[in-house]
Amino acid sequence: MADETRSWFASLPAADFPHLRALSGVVASGSSDERFDIGLEIILRGPASYAREPSGGADPDAGRASGAP
């Protein structure tokens, strides 16, 4: 299922969905509970806060409080 999810995100038009495409690895890994948690956090914080910059910029865990799942 993870490969299918990554493929689906990768198939989105890059010009229209750059952040969702960048998040394909994040939302397609881990257990179902972890995917739910990260999906909810992405919705609350916004996908741009998780998208990695081409130069390796943004860290998806940068805004997360220590000890938070």
Image: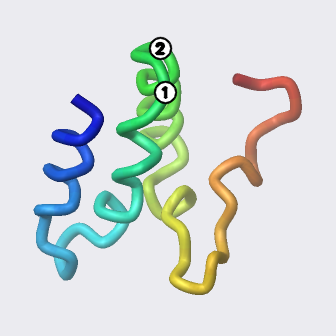
Could you say which quadrant of the image residue 43 lies in? top left
* 57, above or below 30, in the image: below
Q: Which mark is residue 6?
A: none
The secondary structure type at the circle numbered 1 is loop
Q: In the drawing, what numbered circle is on residue 30? A: 1
Q: Between residues 14 and 31, which one lies in front from this camera angle?
A: 31
Q: Circles 1 and 2: CB distance less than 8 Å?
A: yes
Instruction: Say which residue appears at 41% left-offset and 50% top-offset.
Output: 25
Local SS, label 2: helix
Q: What is the number of callouts on the image?
A: 2
Which amino acid, by three-letter code, is at mark 1? Gly
Residue farthest to the front? 3
Q: Position of residue 12 (x, y in %)?
A: 13, 63
**Image check: 24 left or right of 41?**
left
Q: Residue drawn at (23%, 67%), measured in percent from left and top?
A: 17
Give the image location of residue 53, x and y in percent: 54, 78
Which residue, as the protein is rendered here, is positioned at the far bottom?
55
Residue in view at x 42 percent, y 22 percent:
36
Instruction: Indicate the amino acid at tag 2.
Output: Asp
Mark 1 Cα within 10 Å, few/some/many (few <14, many 20+)?
few
State which quarter of the image contains the N terminus.
Answer: top left
As measured in the structure, the alpha-carbon distance from the residue carrying label 1 to the one carrying label 2 is 8 Å
**In the picture provided, is 64 more to the left or to the right than 48?**
right
Label 2 belongs to which residue?
33
The residue sitting at the right extreme is 66
66 left or right, relative to 31: right
Q: Nearer the viewer, mark 1 or mark 2?
A: 1
- The colouring scheme, among rainbow, by chain, secondary structure or one colour, is rainbow
x and y, in percent, of residue 8 in the image: 14, 50
* 11 vs 38: above or below: below
In the image, is residue 20 above or below residue 41? below
